Amino acid sequence: MRRYLFFQPFFLITSLFFSFSYVNATESNYLENQTFMTLSQAEKRWGKKDFSPEEFKRETANNRAKMAVNLIKKKQFIGKRPAEIKKALGEFSGHFWSDNIPTYLIEEGWNQKTDSWQLVFLLDNAGNVKEVRIHKNCCD
């Protein structure tokens, strides 16, 4: 009986550790195979405009692109929950790996057969934003 009591918590803790390790490894592998734009590339492509949550919320994707660099540099959404992002910036408009990850399209190129780009709010294990990046959503 004593051995069983020792192995049960040990097995549970070990299982949880390997589950989190697998999720982190899977996310890392997924991210390595994605295309992201640097801030200098984004500024060259779309320019730079002061970020305003109210303006971002009501603007079109292409007008949001001009605020992308400033939004990322401000880091005001780091540590925030997805619900807080949605409240500040409106409904999510893109998609990245999971519906739970906040995304906003900033360039919709599929009609013109060009690239589409989105802001992606990457989450940590606690579900808070750890990083905001510009991700190539579609098309080569």
Image (cartoon, rainbow, N blue to C red):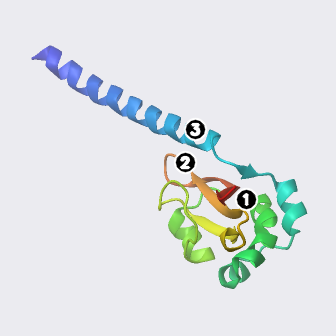
Residue lying farthest front? 113
Q: Nearer the viewer, residue 83 or 62?
A: 62
Residue found at x 75% / y 60%: 72
First in sequence: mark 3 or mark 1? Answer: 3
Q: Position of residue 85 (x, y in %)?
A: 58, 68
Secondary structure beneath dot 3 equals helix
Q: Nearer the viewer, residue 106 or 102?
A: 106
Residue receiving disc 2: 124
Secondary structure beneath dot 1 equals loop
In the rendered image, the quadrant that contains the N terminus is top left
Residue found at x 52% / y 34%: 25
Residue receiving disc 3: 28
Judge depth for marks 3 and 2 and give the one in front. Answer: 3
Q: Position of residue 99 (x, y in %)?
A: 47, 62
Q: Please, what is the three-letter code of the amino acid marked with disc 1?
A: Lys
Marks 2 and 1 sit apart, C-alpha to C-alpha, by: 15 Å
- Cβ atoms under marks 2 and 1 closer than 8 Å: no
Residue 116 picture quarter: bottom right
Residue receiving disc 1: 75
Is 100 located above or below residue 59 in the figure? above
Q: Residues within 10 Å of mark 3 (few under 14, many from 20)?
A: few
Q: Position of residue 91 (x, y in %)?
A: 55, 76
Q: Position of residue 108 (x, y in %)?
A: 68, 71
